[in-house]
Image (cartoon, helix red, strand yellow):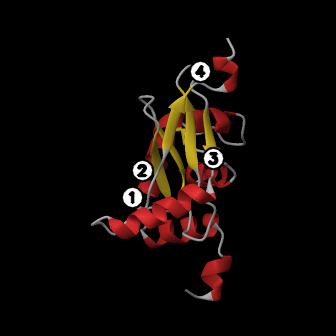
């Protein structure tokens, strides 16, 4: 990989891949990309629409879904299945970028990112023993958050 590829931001990579795939630059696309770039954890399409509502340009839910589909096809975002009957999306990370998993409160629906280097090492060791070339993984832990479990 070239030195330029290491310094390229996710937004630049997303715009370049979208242009290469024949997608024109648009206000809705740019708004969704900028929002996802600043997020630390996965959002639903409704949460994305709500976050963009106060911005310079209102983005319809249909446009949000269309942009997310385009980004997912290009492997620029990944779906996060939290088991809450709503799909969440977050930008896809490069292999050398920070990788996280998710904690889900089954009571209030809160989704929180978490990282654990020991878990990553264990997954790496496991991937050497299974008959599969592991390309990605996602861990979702369910339970009750501190606020919900104190009640």
Q: Which secondary structure lies at badge 2?
A: helix
| Residue that label 4 marks | 108
Residue 16: which disc?
none
Give the residue displayed 55% in from the left and 33% down from the top: 104
First reached walking from the N terminus: tag 2 or tag 3: 2
Above or below, 58 against 72 in this view is above
Q: Which residue is mark 3?
A: 114
Q: Residues within 10 Å of mark 2 (few under 14, many from 20)?
A: some
Q: Earlier in the sequence, mark 1 or mark 4?
A: 1
Residue 101, given in percent of the width and then of the height, sits at 55, 48
Separation of residues labelled 3 and 4 (CA atoms): 18 Å
Q: Dot 3 surroundings within 10 Å: few (below 14), some, or many (20 or more)? A: some
Marks 4 and 2 in Cβ contact (< 8 Å): no
**Quarter where residue 30 is shown:** bottom right
Do the numbered discs 2 and 3 sit on residues whose CB atoms are within 8 Å? Answer: no
Name the quadrant containing residue 128: bottom left
- What residue would you read off at disc 1? 73
* Discs 1, 2 touching: Cβ within 8 Å: yes
> Can residue 27 be seen by looking at this rendering?
yes
Tell me which residue sits at (63%, 64%) in the image: 11
The residue indicated by pointer 2 is 69
- Crowding around mark 4 (Cα neighbors within 10 Å: few <14, some 14 to 19, many 20+) is few
Q: Which residue is at 50% across, 60% downward?
A: 122
Out of 53 and 107, give the one closest to the viewer. Answer: 107
């Amino acid at each position: 990989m070239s030195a330029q590829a290491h310094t390229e931001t996710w937004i630049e990579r997303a715009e370049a891949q979208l242009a290469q795939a024949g997608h024109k630059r648009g206000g809705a696309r740019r708004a969704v990309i900028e929002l996802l770039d600043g997020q630390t954890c996965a959002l639903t399409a409704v949460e994305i629409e709500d976050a963009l509502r106060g911005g310079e340009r209102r983005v319809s839910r249909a446009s949000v879904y269309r942009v997310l589909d385009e980004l997912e096809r290009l492997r620029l975002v990944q779906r996060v299945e939290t088991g809450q009957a709503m799909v969440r999306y977050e930008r896809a990370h490069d292999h050398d970028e920070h990788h996280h998993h998710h904690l889900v409160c089954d009571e209030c629906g809160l989704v929180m990112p978490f990282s654990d280097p020991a878990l990553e090492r264990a997954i790496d060791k496991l991937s050497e023993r299974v008959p599969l070339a592991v390309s990605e993984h996602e861990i979702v832990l369910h339970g009750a958050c501190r606020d919900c479990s104190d009640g």
